[in-house]
Amino acid sequence: MSNQKAPQDTCVLVTGGAGFIGSHTVVKLLEGGYQVVIVDDLSNASERVLDRIDRIVGEDASSRLSFYRADVNDREALDVIFDENPIDRVIHFAGFKAVGESVSKPIEYYSNNIGSTLTLVDVMRDHGCKSIVFSSSATVYGDPDALPLTEQSPKKPATNPYGWTKWMIEEILGSLHTADPAWNVVLLRYFNPIGAHPSGLMGEDPKGIPNNLLPYVAQVAVGRRDRVHVFGDDYDTPDGTGVRDYIHVMDLAAGHVAALAWMDGRTGVEVFNLGTGNGTSVLEIIEAFSAACGRELPYVIEPRRPGDVTANYADCAKARREMGWEAQFGIADMCRDSWTWQSHNPNGYEG
Ligand code: WQD
C-alpha cells in the first residue's frame, strides 16, 4: 500500500505543467493545498503561464509552486528535481500531441513520448516514488464498435504514432506494477479537452495552425483565421459532421485532483474515462461558439480528414462511482470561457 498523505503534506511533480491541461491542473492542485513542482521544456508552452498561475491562485498558494525548465528525457535534470524536492506523486502530461504531425514524424514521437516516460519512471524508481497519474486518451479505443465507451471497451489499434504512444505507455506502466506490485498507477483517458480558465488568464495556445477544432474556431472568432474548415459532413451522425465528447479543461483538472485523492494509500493499475457522456457535432460547436462570441462564424465543408472516427463519447460512471468526480460544465460554458481567453489574448501568451 502506498503511504496516505494529506494534500498539504504531498508534493506532486507535474511534467508538462506549463501546457494547456497541465497548467489548469496545477491551478487546481495549488488551490487544493498541494506542493507542486513543474518540469517543462517549454517546447510547446510559454513561461508566461507561470505568472498567470500566480495571479489566479494568489501569493500564498503560488509560494508552494516550483518550476524547472528541463526536458523529461534529461535524466540528470530529473535526478536534481527529485534530490531537491520530496516528490510523492507524479502527474505525467509531457509529450508531443499533434496527431497529424505524428504521422510525418514517427521517430520524434516514439523517442520523445515513450523515451521520456521510460526515463521518468526509472528515475522515480531510483528515488522510491512509485505513484503516477498518466495523461492518456480516448484515442486508445480507436474506432469504437459500440458507444458510449466504458473502461472495459477494448483498446484497438491506433491510427497514428501519437495514438500508439498513448497506447504503449499505458502498457509500460501496467508492466511496472506486474514487476513490482508497489507501483500505484492511474490512467486517465481524456476525451476532447477544450475551454479555458474562467478568468480568461489561461487557455489553449497551440503553436502554428491549430490541429484541433476548438482553438481553430476560436481563432476564426477573433479574426486570425477566415473560416472554419469542417472535415466532412457525410458521417453517420445527426447532422453529418463528426461527434466528440468535449470536456471543460477545468473539469479535467478537477479529475486529476480527484485521482490523487482516490489513489492515496492504494497500489495497482486503474483506468478512468474523463468525459461528459455527451456527444457534440462540429456544426453544433460552431453554433455554440457563434453564440458565445456574438456573431455567426463562417465555415466551409471539406473532405473528411484521414484517420478521423465518426463519433466517440464516454461512459463516466466509474469515475463518478469510484472518485466522486463528474463533469460540471456544458458546451456553452466551454465556449464562453474559451472565448473569454481568446478575446483577451488574441495571440495567446506571446500576444
Ligand atoms: C474534433 C472533430 C474533426 C479540426 C484529437 C486526439 C485526442 C486529443 C484531442 C490531444 C473531428 C473535426 C477538427 C478542424 C474539423 N489529443 N475538425 N475541423 O481528432 O477528436 O482528437 O485531439 O490532446 O487524443 O485524437 O480532436 O479537435 O482534432 O477534431 O472539422 O479544423 O472536429 O474531424 O470530427 P480529435 P479534433
Image (spheres, rainbow, N blue to C red):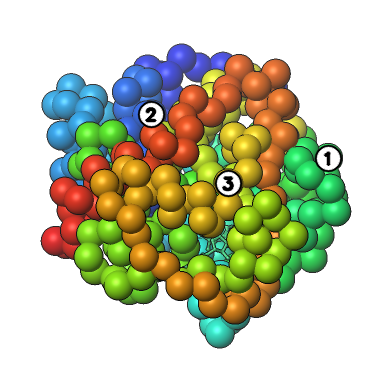
Distance from the alpha carbon under mark 2 to that under mark 3: 29 Å
Work out which quarter of the rendered image holds the N terminus and state it. Answer: top right
Q: Relative to residue 117, is residue 296 drawn left or right?
A: left
List the residue tagged with mark 2: 29
Secondary element type, mark 2 = helix
Side (left or right) of 25 relative to 271: left
The first of marks 3 and 1 along the sequence is 1
Query: Of 40 and 307, which appears nearest the observer?
Result: 307
Marks 2 and 1, the one that precedes in the sequence: 2
Residue 317 visible to the viewer: yes
Q: Secondary structure at mark 3?
A: strand
Q: Nearer the viewer, residue 156 or 71?
A: 156
Tell me the residue that label 3 is attached to: 280
Residue 225, image x, y percentages: 29, 71
Instruction: Examine the image and state in which quarter residue 144 appears.
Output: bottom right
Residue at 16% over, 43% down: 51
Label 1 element class: loop
User: Is residue 102 among what the camera can see?
Assistant: no
Q: Residues within 10 Å of mark 1 (few under 14, many from 20)?
A: few
Crowding near pointer 2: few (<14 within 10 Å), some, many (20+)? many
In whole angstroms, how far apart are the C-alphas of marks 3 and 1? 23 Å
Question: Where is residue 65 drawn, in percent x and y?
Answer: 27, 35
| Residue 195: % across, % down | 39, 44
- Residue in the image at 68% along x and 68% along y: 234
Q: What distance separates the C-alpha of mark 2 from that of mark 1? A: 29 Å
Report ligand 1 position as a quadrant: bottom right
For this view, does 219 lie left or right of residue 299? left
Image quadrant assignment for residue 340: top left
Quadrant containing the C terminus in the rendered view: bottom left
Q: Which residue is mark 1?
A: 152
